[in-house]
């Protein structure tokens, strides 16, 4: 990780850890669950070499960033508040945004609340999901997939943490990061992990080394998973907070990239939304949709070189 600098920034009442490299226009990278700034290690190197300043924080509750104890400290307003303060601290008015998984969802919130701060957005895995004014988010997932759907299983504070503790951080992270099973992740009660990756092998995929996995494990051994799980526990609260933006469109320029095997892309109705006109209607400046053949959910790590090129090809236009 040569040349990457680390520092701590005060944002929105918490201390945030930031990794960065390079000079030039800022490219802000947002990670997902269960990940860290480190998920962007390859993209940081490439984008910084192309004349940009790559900035990747550990989001609130993750890694070396503070994790407030209260579940209610992880709403969309808290997370976006952290990021606006981070952008302010960088001394710039606007950034290019690149985000994956939960980071992608946070990225949509950021584009919705503060489009003036975003030049363009490269979004991985999670498309913009328009608010349904009649159904709360978790309630909708429960109706579609049942109680064993992973987001439903994550709702009760302490419950999933206890199950994860039984198998250990190394198992949890390896299981999540290496899953290639398409469709909605189901976690049958009484056991952890089989819904994500029932066929987990001892060997890691070519794109994840033992040392890289060990970095993730070391950080989550220290923090636990509660911070990340608290994002899921605020989905229904976010639904209430987003009421003023019901029906609002995302106006920033967007490029969307997903894997053919991605668990989000292969869930109910998602392909039809992405390709059938709904996504473009909600995000009128959606310029491109890329579906990567044979690629699963963690495409920012699995196909880092390809993702880096896609990012650069898009942001260089602005």
Image (cartoon, grey):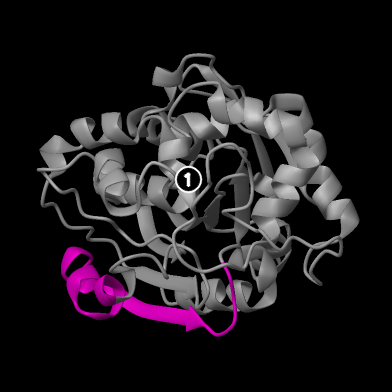
Disc count in the image?
1
The residue that label 1 is drawn on is 150
Please tell me whether residue 120 belongs to the stretch shown in magenta: no
Image spot of residue 63 (x, y percent): 68, 33
Tell whether 98 sits left or right of 244.
right
Image spot of residue 246 (x, y percent): 12, 45
In the figure, 307 relative to 113: above or below? below
Tell whether 250 sits left or right of 64.
left
Nearer the observer, 10 or 298? 298
Work out which quarter of the rendered image holds the C terminus and state it. bottom left
In the figure, 318 relative to 245: above or below? below
In the figure, 293 relative to 59: above or below? below
Nearer the observer, 264 or 288? 264
Residue occupying the far front of the picture = 190
In the figure, 85 relative to 132: above or below? above
* Quadrant in which residue 265 is drawn: bottom left
Tell whether 283 sits left or right of 227.
left
Image spot of residue 262 (x, y percent): 51, 68
The answer to whether residue 110 is seen in the rendering is yes
Q: Residue at x 31, y 48 (%)?
A: 141
The answer to whether residue 65 is seen in the rendering is no
Q: Residue at x 26, y 47 (%)?
A: 143
Q: Which element is circle 1 on? A: helix
Image spot of residue 205 (x, y percent): 79, 69
Q: Which residues are magenta?
A: 272-296
Tell whether 208 sits left or right of 250.
right
* Quadrant in which residue 36 is drawn: top right
């Amino acid at each position: 990780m040569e040349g990457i600098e680390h520092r701590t920034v005060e944002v929105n009442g918490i201390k945030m850890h930031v990794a960065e490299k390079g000079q030039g226009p800022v490219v802000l990278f947002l990670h997902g669950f269960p990940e860290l700034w480190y998920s962007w290690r390859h993209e940081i190197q490439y984008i910084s070499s192309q004349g940009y300043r790559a900035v990747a924080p550990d989001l609130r509750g993750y890694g070396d960033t503070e994790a407030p104890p209260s579940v209610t400290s992880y709403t969309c307003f808290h997370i976006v508040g952290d990021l606006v303060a981070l952008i302010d601290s960088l001394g710039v008015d606007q950034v290019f945004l690149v985000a994956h998984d939960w980071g992608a969802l946070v990225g949509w919130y950021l584009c919705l609340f503060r489009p003036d701060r975003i030049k363009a957005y490269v979004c991985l895995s999670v498309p913009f999901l328009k608010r349904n004014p009649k159904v709360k988010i978790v309630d909708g997932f429960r109706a579609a997939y049942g109680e064993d759907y992973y987001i439903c299983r994550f709702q009760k504070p302490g419950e999933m943490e206890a199950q994860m503790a039984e198998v250990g951080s190394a198992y949890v992270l390896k299981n999540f990061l290496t899953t290639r099973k398409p469709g909605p992740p189901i976690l049958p009660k009484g056991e952890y992990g089989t819904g994500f990756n029932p066929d987990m092998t001892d060997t890691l995929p070519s794109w994840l080394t033992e040392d890289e996995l060990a970095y993730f494990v070391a950080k989550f051994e220290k923090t636990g998973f509660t911070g990340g799980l608290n994002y899921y526990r605020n989905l229904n609260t976010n639904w209430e907070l987003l009421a003023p933006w019901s029906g609002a469109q995302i106006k920033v320029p967007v490029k969307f990239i997903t894997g053919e095997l991605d668990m989000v892309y292969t869930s109910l109705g998602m392909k039809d939304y992405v390709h059938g006109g709904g996504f473009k209607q909600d995000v009128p400046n959606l310029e491109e949709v890329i579906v990567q053949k044979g690629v699963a959910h963690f495409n920012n790590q699995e196909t880092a070189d390809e993702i880096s090129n896609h990012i650069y090809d898009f942001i260089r236009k602005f």
